[in-house]
Image (cartoon, rainbow, N blue to C red):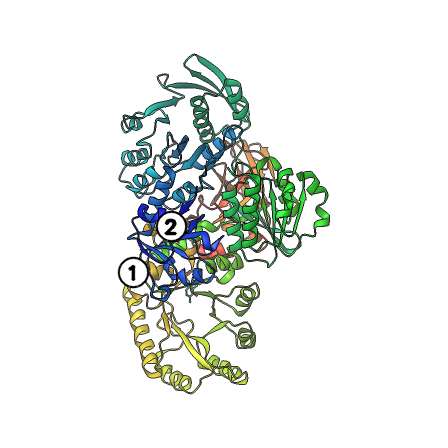
Amino acid sequence: MIVTLKNIIPVIGAKWVGEFDAADISHISIDSRSLQNGSETLFFALSGPNNDAHNYIGELIDIGVVNFVVSYIPDDVKNQANFLVVPNTLAALQQFATWYRNHFKFPVIGITGSNGKTIIKEWLNFLLGPDFNIIRSPKSYNSQVGVPLSVISINEKHNIGIFEAGISTVSEMEKLEPIIAPTIGILTNIGSAHDEGFSNIAQKIKEKLKLFKHSDLLIYNLNKTIEAFIPSVTKRFSWSFKDETADVYLERRISGEHTSILVTWNERAFEVVIPFRDDASVENAVHCLMVLLHLGYENDVIKSRISMLFPVEMRLKVKNGIYNSTVIDDSYSSDFQSLKIALDFLETQKQHKKKTLILSDIFQSGLTNEELYSRVSQLVISNKINRVIGIGETISAFKNKFVNCITFDTTNEFLAAFDTLNFGNETILVKGARQFRFEKVVALLEEKTHETVLEINLNAISHNLNFFRSKLDPGTKMMVMVKAFGYGNGGIEIARLLEHHKVDYLGVAFADEGIALKTQGISLPIMVMNPESTSFASIIQHGLEPEIYSLKGLDAFLKIANDKKLEHYPIHIKLDTGMHRLGFQEPQLAELIAILRHHKSVKVKSILSHMATSDDLRHHEFALSQIALFEKMSSLMMDQLEIDPIRHILNTSGISNYGEAQFDMVRLGIGLYGISNDASEQKYLENVGTLKSIISQIRTIPTGDSVGYGRRFIAEHETRIATIPIGYADGISRHWGRGAGYVNINGKKAPITGSVCMDMLMVDVTGITCKEGDPVVIFGENPTVIYMAQKLETIPYEILTSISQRVKRVFYRE
Ligand SMILES: *Cc1c(COP(=O)(O)O)cnc(C)c1O
């Protein structure tokens, strides 16, 4: 469908400010960092509480974008582009998507509910794939922004749509409903807890059901509370394991690793094997089965396709690869939309200059192959990919569309040629459809790790950053502390993400941490809190900015700065307002000011202090006295030196408890990593790190036998013991052993028996269904680091930073 600006103006009710309104629009974008084709892009400048895309319009004009939907025209770009001015740019994006959606008349499946949306969507894509050209939401694009972006990828070739909708509060579904306009609805499992955004579960159900206001049919698990809210125009198509009055009645039998169910509907009765046994997967599979029944599939087809369902891996994982490469593993899907997302992600991961894409044939794009591979080639060029390795017969046939490209007809041919491809010192995106079995490719590229890993959720970090940003006054800057390897979570990877999110400053403890970040390409300014005099020369060489906290340090730095004939080199002055750790005290200020006044080699970029009790309201008065003293001392310096530095005193708990003292910047630390010192705030943060291992061995011991060194555990009954390859050398405190702590195996608590050893620990798995090789969670969602810290009488900071560097970090995003 060809869309021009002229079409769009009335649809979104825009005021037109520009010269040329006949332009074709072939791309819609909201993210200034990932643009594909400038002149045919319409950029919607969305603005959140802390990030306003209007600020990037200038940069976008520089790279060739000419069409913008804005809520105001920033002064610096007046008359430089076409502007569609609307009251609210998000609402405009949604109106546009609704209008666009209305041009297509094919069936659309809309999915909502608390759990399972993305899995059902991916499974339906697999089940219906042989018979339809499917358009579906990429990954879990189900939000107020994600849904419109998904829908505007529909084109004429598609003949069925599958979209998911997720809401967190009332009134959101009303906006998503006309955009998706589902004809077939699926209501997945509704979680029993009510979320923050809803007053009770009935309200939550009622809100979710608004998605199906105009649907012809609703598929759901029979339940009286739900029925009360189903719109009267909607035909009900219910299923149940319990209630024979449901439209489709199912009898469930578990057999080994599978679940077999007997399906009875109208005159039909047949058995289906679902290759899973957990309740959630079975329920998701049944929802898919209902769609197949509704669409008129035969028993045999249903049976054979359902039996092939597979675990859905939705996450893009970043792994350390062979020969100093980095592997981004997205080896479970290859559609055009998710290729775009993966390439955007590759762009944020600036580990290496060189970038390689390993790509399989792409299915169901709704485009001709000619058109499809032209577009893929455009994406490859705009993302500056250095080499493309194509696997599959179709991509091989279009090899000439790419510049530096090698192709193979099959994955096995690629594997046979692997050693000749010289992988190393590059970022490799591995992106392929399931049937190409690219997990074999990843296995070869991946550096071998031992079984214990700390998984870091990059989405959670972004979420937590945004949460704290939302607490800042407009204009307050943000420094993020990435000292101690990003609190144990990985320094460089997190620094890159923060650079992507345009924070203002990074903070490290020592010069070598800052040097490591700079040499790996981080360009954000970095403050070094504890620079030793011996490191001043390399601090300057790498463009790091020292914190100066004593006259002696100042003197030493000035000597070097003068020698090197520096001018206005940025330094940060630390004031001691009561922490009594580092910093100038009040009586030293006069001398400090006198020296600074006479030296133009340095410039006071910022003045800071640190609070001793921002997390503990029992010391509220003391905290206020620190803030007051900071105000007084910093004002004196500013008046006498006639300077206007950035002032900052708040750490994470300071942001939570002393928001009025933001000054010009805050220093976020532990909060980014998902930990708040304030219980009421904790629930808004997402868990970042999950320390995982596996079961090495399981044995059963009789009553009276002991486990481990010193026989510190004696079995009081027959006991099943599992051994996990993680110990105190990995950072697990010995105090966590001997029954004090537990690990999580298949959702169950397994208490640690006996003492934690150097490289291993043993747990009691009596009564827990598990086998050798099963995954074990040491901490993460359960137990949380906060819980561990309480039990161990320490603080989460110590637990996180104790995880030894021999534990591999694996980064992923949802
Ligand atoms: C570590 C540190 C922070 C961050 O503290 P959190 O409690 O982790 O937010 C801020 N300022 C200074 C000086 C620090 O050393």
- Res 413 → quadrant: top right
For residue 684, the mark is: none
Q: Nearer the viewer, residue 454 or 491?
A: 491
**Res. 127 in view:** yes
Q: Mark 1 Cα within 10 Å, few/some/many (few <14, many 20+)?
A: few
Determine which quarter of the picture holds residue 56. bottom left
Q: Amino acid at mark 2?
A: Leu
Q: Compared to 263, does 280 lie above or below?
A: below
Question: In which quadrant of the rendered image does the N terminus lie?
Answer: top left
Query: Is 353 positioned to the left or the right of 158 in the image?
Result: right
Q: Position of residue 555 (x, y in %)?
A: 48, 83
Image check: 539 left or right of 666?
A: right
Per the image, label 2 sits on a secondary structure element best described as helix
Residue 116 shows up from this direction: no
Q: Is mark 2 within 8 Å of ligand 1?
A: no
| x, y percent for residue 473 | 31, 62
SS at circle 1: helix
Query: Disc 2 or disc 1, which is closer to the eye?
Result: 2
| Amino acid type at image mark 1 | Arg
Q: Is mark 1 within 8 Å of ligand 1?
A: no
The residue labelled by disc 2 is 5
**Residue 626, horizontal then vertical, whole percent:** 32, 70
The answer to whether 302 is drawn above or below residue 767 in the figure is: above
Mark 2 to mark 1: distance in Å? 60 Å
**Callout 2: few (<14), some (14-19), or many (20+) C-alpha neighbours within 10 Å?**
some
Measuring from the top left, give residue 311's x and y in whole percent.
53, 34
Identified at 47% across, 42% down, the residue is 139
Residue at image mark 1: 618
